[in-house]
Each structure stands twice: as C-alpha cells, then as structure tokens.
Image: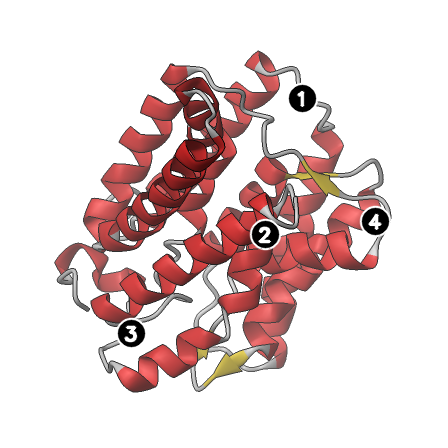
Amino acid sequence: MLFKDDIRDYQILFLSLFLVLGISTRDWTLKPELIGVAIATSLSTQWLLSLATKTEQINLRSPLITSLGLSLLLRTDHWMTMGFAAVSAITSKFVFKVGDKHFFNPANFGIISVLALTNDAWVSPGQWGEDWWYGLLFAGTGGMILQRVGRWDTTAAFLSTYAALQAICNLRLGWTWDVYWHQLMNGSLLLFALFMVTDPRSIPNAQIGRIVWAVCIAILTFILKNYLFVSTAVFWALFTLAPFTMLLDLLWSAPRFSWSFSSRQSPDS
C-alpha cells in the first residue's frame, strides 16, 4: 500500500517535488526529455537485470528514486549521456556487491561514471542557491524519512564534521562568517547529506560503522574541496570510500536494513 508499508514512496514524492520546484523556481537547464530518459532507462535496466539474475521480486521503487536523483543533480546536453548514467547506476547494484549487499550508491555511481568517462556531463553544486526555505524544505522532508529509517546518525556525523572543519579553516584564513554560511547553506550539500549519503541499503549496517564512515567522507570532502579545489568533492568522496562499507560491516556486525520493515526497525539495525 502506498505511503504505509514502504518509506520509499515518500522519497519518490519528495524528490519529484524537488524536481518540479527546481525547474520552476531555479530556471534549470535540464530538459524534460532527459528526465524521461533517466526514468525509462533506470526502470528498464532494473527490470532486465532482475530477470537475467532471476531476482524473485522486482521492485521498481529504488530505480525510480535513482532516476530522480540523477535528474536532480546531473546535467548533460545529450540523452545518451543521461542514459549511460542511468544504466551505470542500476548495473552497479548487480555487479559491485558482496553477498546480497551492493556498496555503491547507485545515483552516485552513475554521476561519477559520466563525469569520468564522458565530456558531456557536469554537476552544479550551487544550482539550488542559498535560499533559506530550500534548506527548511530539505531538512523537513529528509528528516521525516531519516526518522523512519533510523539513519539520522549518518547525516549528523557528516554535517557536524564538515561544518567543524570549515569553521576551523574559516578562522585560520580570517574569512568572514558570511563565507562560512555560504559554504554550508547549499541545497545540493543538504540533498547529498539527507538523501544520498544515508542510503540505508548501501551504507554500513551498524551505527558505529555509519558514524565512522560519515566522518571519513566529511574529511575527504573537505580535503578535495579546499586543497584540490574539486567542486564535486562530496560525490567523489562518497564514491572513493563506498567499498570500505564492507570492511566496516566486518568490524561491527549488524543486520542489514530492509525496506519492508523500515517502520519497525531500531536505529542500530
């Protein structure tokens, strides 16, 4: 049943709302046909690979969420590039896995794939601007989902670590606090922290593992952004450290998250 048994229904609703708001209020260059390509390619790839690997239950919620994430964050001028991102994203779930767990966030893998392998893709970290009401909207909707899935610890660890490092850097360089808030009040950063780095199916299972992992991603993001001047630092940091979720699961064992029982699971599940 929609909005009752699976929290992903809310994710789909909220991400769709963000997409509509982004196109209507931020004057994005994303073409509607590319959104259609992302959705159609993600769903068809999931369906075909599920049949090929004899997956008993084919659930299209996850690939739909992946396609919406790609539409929100990735920019390209050609439909083949968007299609390649979607195929790469969904395929990563079937290829890069240990047991029944994939360790790359699909949307993040798709974004990195086209950034690294094509010349027709980019991510604009500042595309959401710094309007305060976007931050409230993201925090409110993302917070509801995180409360249900019990992954507030990951977002809190990432944002607090990154904010602390930026504050130290700000003080050391003598910058005004306007610069500091400019770095933090970024819609794309909040989307990443609330909806991507918290993907419960690909991040570490145990709470202590998630906190350690999120702190490491924040540190690597800070280094890439402030010392190597990589504008897409958060995405590269997540991609680089994703395989370490398997090591953290070995160090701290816990049951893997299941969407079917998300409303009944504890935060340490």
First along the sequence among labels 4 and 2: 4
Residue receiving disc 3: 256
- Return the mark for residue 207: none
Q: Label 1: state its secondary structure.
A: loop
When the figure is inspected, residue 183 is found, relative to residue 263, above or below; the finding is above
Q: Estimate the spatial distance between the alpha carbons at disc 3 and disc 4, rounded to whole Å.
A: 35 Å
Q: Estimate the spatial distance between the alpha carbons at disc 4 and disc 2, rounded to whole Å.
A: 29 Å
Specify the amino acid type for callout 4: Met
Specify the amino acid type for callout 2: Leu
Q: Label 3: state its secondary structure.
A: loop
When the figure is inspected, residue 81 is found, relative to residue 245, above or below; the finding is above
Mark closer to the observer (3, 2): 2
- The residue positioned 71% from the left and 59% from the top of the image is 113
Q: Estimate the spatial distance between the alpha carbons at disc 1 and disc 3, rounded to whole Å.
A: 37 Å
Mark closer to the observer (1, 4): 1
Image location (x, y in percent) of residue 112: 67, 56
Q: Nearest the camera: 44 or 190?
A: 190
Residue receiving disc 4: 80
Q: Estimate the spatial distance between the alpha carbons at disc 2 and disc 1, rounded to whole Å.
A: 26 Å
Is the residue marked by circle 2 packed among few (<14), some (14-19), or many (20+) residues within 10 Å?
some
Q: Label 2: state its secondary structure.
A: helix
Q: Nearest the camera: 131 or 75?
A: 131
Image location (x, y in percent) of residue 19: 54, 28
Specify the amino acid type for callout 3: Arg
- The residue positioned 61% from the left and 49% from the top of the image is 227
Q: Estimate the spatial distance between the alpha carbons at disc 1 and disc 4, rounded to whole Å.
A: 19 Å
Circles 4, 2 touching at the beta carbon (< 8 Å): no
Residue receiving disc 1: 28
- The residue positioned 75% from the left and 47% from the top of the image is 82
- Tell whether 253 sits left or right of 123: left
